[in-house]
Structure formats: structure tokens, C-alpha cells
Amino acid sequence: MTTHSAPPASVPLASGSPVGPVYADRGASHYDILAVLMAVVVILSGIGASKGVFFGTVPGIGFEIITDAGFFLFPLAYILGDVITEIYGVRAARRALITAFAMNILAVITYQIVIELPGFTDDFGTAKQQALELALGPVWIVVLAGLLGFLAGQSLNTLVMSRMKRRFGERGLVGRLLTSSGLGELVDTIVFCSIAAAAIGITTVEQWAQYTVLGFLYKVLVQYAAIPVTSAVIRWIKRTDPSYQERLRASRGNLPAQA
């Protein structure tokens, strides 16, 4: 008589405490999709951030609402970084970060080649050449600012996430997201705004301060507002990723640990 064993059920994430932090395999499940999304977000944010945006002045206090055109997209890069770090670990997050910026550098090199190639000399060709130089010419400065800022901020974000997970295991996910996001965005915003300000037309210390404060508050508020969705996505991937479930069961003593 032949018997068929049922597939192992997913381990409830809140039950028990793993011996150490648990991570999924990079080659399995959703890592490739998350890494590609991060690269696309970083590239598009670099293009958008080359344009300064002015929404007016807050009545009564004279605070100017100054930002850049990448403001609505960039927080998603940190959200994706949080998801990758929590599920796949520090090395996987670092790999996604390096890949994203390598692709961003490739994009900047491509822009410069496009600008330098000889174009048509009629009125339309000349106008297009001038538009490309004006729009894409300063992008390399923004990309440099983004590279240094995101590298510093996301590295701190990843470090805090991983250290807190090492200490608390599967517990305290929301606390990890809150703490790492705030610290990472603070460092990122200060570095980025200090370098990119001139490229988008900010010329005074007052404008820089307003740009930096508003950018930090906006990014953190967006990430905090997205935490319920972020944590739900993380928990869903953990439940549906076979390698994560296998290591979770092994860590809790339900299965023998495998290399």
C-alpha cells in the first residue's frame, strides 16, 4: 500500500522563538522581482530628482515647500530594502543595493553618450539636443548624491534591521521597520540634499534647510504610513517561501537543520 505524505504546513510566524535570525534563499521565490524593482525605482528617482519642485509657501510661517520630482517614488526604494533585508538578509540586501546603483551608473553613462552623439542640425534636431542637455545633463550629479546618500542611509537601515532581528527573531517586525526607516532616511536625506541642491537650482542655506527638513519628514511619514502594507507583504512572503519555512522549522527544532 502506497502512502503519500502531506506537504509540510507553514509555521506560524508568532509561535516559538528561533535560535537565530532566519532568512530565505536568494535563488528562491521573490528576491529577483524585488531586486529588479529596486533598480528601476532608483533609476527613475535619479531622473526625477534632477527637477526642483516648488509647491508654494506655508501661510503665516513663510516655510517654502521645496522638493524634487523624485519625491513620490524614492521612499519605495527603502520599503523594498526593508523587505529584502528582513526576508533574505544583509548580504542579499547589499547585493540588491549594489546592483541598483550599478544600473543607475549605466543609465547615466548612457545619457552622456546620447548627449554627445551628433544629432540632426535642423531646428527640431537642435532644439531636441538642447532639451536633452538641459534635462539629462545634471542627472549625474543627482545620481552621485543618490549613490552616496542611499548607500549611507540604506547601509544603516540594513544594519539596524538585521541587528534587531538577530536580537528579537520573528518578534518586533514593526519596531524594526520604524527604527531602521527613521535612522536610514535621516542620514540619506542630509547627504543627498547637500550634494543635489545645486543641481536642482537651490542656492541658499535657507532653501537647503527647508528642502532637507521637508524631504526627511515626507519620506519617513510615507514609510511609516506604508508599514501595515510592508509588514503584511513580508509576512505573506515568509509564509509562502519554501526555503524560509524550512529554515524556520529547523531553527525551532521541528526539523533537522540543513546546510
Image (cartoon, rainbow, N blue to C red):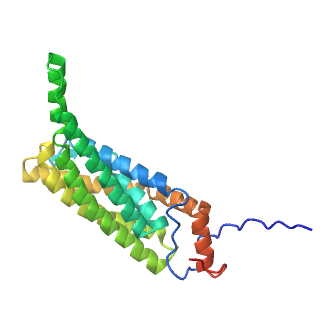
Q: Is residue 161 visible?
A: yes
Residue furthest to the right: 1
Above or below — where is 134 with respect to 62? Answer: above
In which image quadrant can residue 16 be found?
bottom right
Left or right, 134 with reference to 234: left
Residue 38: x %, y % from top left: 39, 52
* Foreground of the two, 67 or 253: 253
Residue 220: x %, y % from top left: 33, 58
* Foreground of the two, 126 or 214: 126
In which image quadrant can residue 192 be found?
bottom left
Residue furthest to the left: 204
Residue 153: x %, y % from top left: 28, 63
Q: Is residue 186 visible?
A: no
Left or right, 125 with reference to 102: left
In which image quadrant can residue 92 be found?
bottom left
- Residue at the spot x=33%, y=59% of the render? 98
- Residue at the spot x=32%, y=43% of the render? 44
Residue furthest to the front: 118
* Foreground of the two, 208 or 155: 155
* Foreground of the two, 144 or 187: 144
- Residue at the spot x=20%, y=44% of the render? 139
Above or below — where is 160 with respect to 211? Answer: below
Residue 77: x %, y % from top left: 36, 54
**Total residue callouts:** 0
Above or below — where is 126 with respect to 5? Answer: above
Quadrant for the N terminus in the image: bottom right
Quadrant for the C terminus in the image: bottom right
Left or right, 166 with reference to 221: right
- Residue at the spot x=24%, y=54% of the render? 146
